[in-house]
């Protein structure tokens, strides 16, 4: 089975875009984790529910409402950051698999050329 010109162009375009999965996605994951750790360090009200609950308990507003809001907002931000981190992790796994598929296609193409070369020399 040989690859058509259209399939060959498709594979080449995929190979050109592989750097996105192998270099950009890990950088984005590291940046996201850095932001998450930075939020714990510099703005703990955004991501630490217990810190938010303790901070808002002394406010003159009704305790239950503000505490519930503070905990809910912090938990929702953590869930959002976790979902983003998981999405980036799965994208990295996709990039690894894509790279493996491309290597297999190159091996298939090389094997086809090796088989076709002796057949072309036959009288």
Image (cartoon, grey):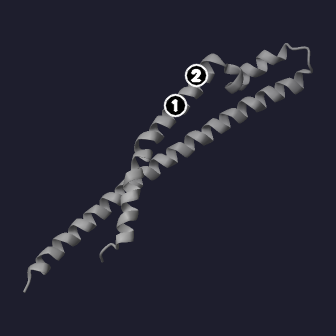
User: For this rendering, which residue is in front, 50 or 6?
Assistant: 6
Which quadrant of the figure has residue 98? bottom left
At a point 59% along the width and 28% down the height, the residue shown is: 36
In the rendered structure, the answer to whether residue 59 lies left or right of residue 20 reads: right
The residue beneath circle 1 is 31
Tag count: 2
**Residue 76 location (% of width, % of height):** 72, 35
In the picture, the quarter occupied by the N terminus is bottom left
Q: Residues within 10 Å of mark 1 (few under 14, many from 20)?
A: few
**Residue 105 location (% of width, % of height):** 31, 64
Q: Earlier in the sequence, mark 1 or mark 2?
A: 1
In the rendered structure, the answer to whether residue 119 lies left or right of residue 38 reads: left
The relative height of residue 39 versus residue 101 in the rendered view (above or below) is: above
**Residue 94 location (% of width, % of height):** 46, 52
User: For this rendering, which residue is in front, 98 or 69?
Assistant: 98
In the picture, the quarter occupied by the C terminus is bottom left
The residue beneath circle 2 is 38
In the rendered structure, the answer to whether residue 44 lies left or right of residue 24 reads: right
Q: Residue 47 bears which disc, if any?
A: none
Q: Residues within 10 Å of mark 2 (few under 14, many from 20)?
A: few
Residue farthest along the bottom direction in this orientation: 123
**Residue 58 location (% of width, % of height):** 85, 13
At a point 92% along the width and 21% down the height, the residue shown is: 62
Which quadrant of the figure has residue 54? top right
The relative height of residue 38 versus residue 24 in the rendered view (above or below) is: above
User: For this rendering, which residue is in front, 15 or 36?
Assistant: 15
Disc 2 is placed on an element classified as helix
């Amino acid at each position: 089975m040989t690859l058509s010109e259209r399939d060959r162009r498709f594979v080449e375009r995929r190979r050109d875009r592989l750097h996105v999965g192998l270099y950009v996605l890990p950088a984005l994951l590291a940046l996201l984790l850095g932001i998450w750790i930075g939020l714990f360090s510099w703005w703990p009200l955004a991501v630490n529910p217990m810190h938010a609950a303790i901070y808002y308990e002394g406010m003159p507003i009704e305790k239950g409402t503000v505490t519930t809001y503070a905990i809910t907002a912090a938990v929702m931000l953590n869930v959002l950051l976790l979902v983003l981190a998981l999405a980036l992790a799965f994208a990295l796994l996709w990039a690894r698999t894509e790279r493996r598929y491309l290597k297999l296609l190159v091996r298939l193409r090389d094997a086809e050329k090796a088989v076709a070369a002796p057949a072309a020399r036959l009288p």
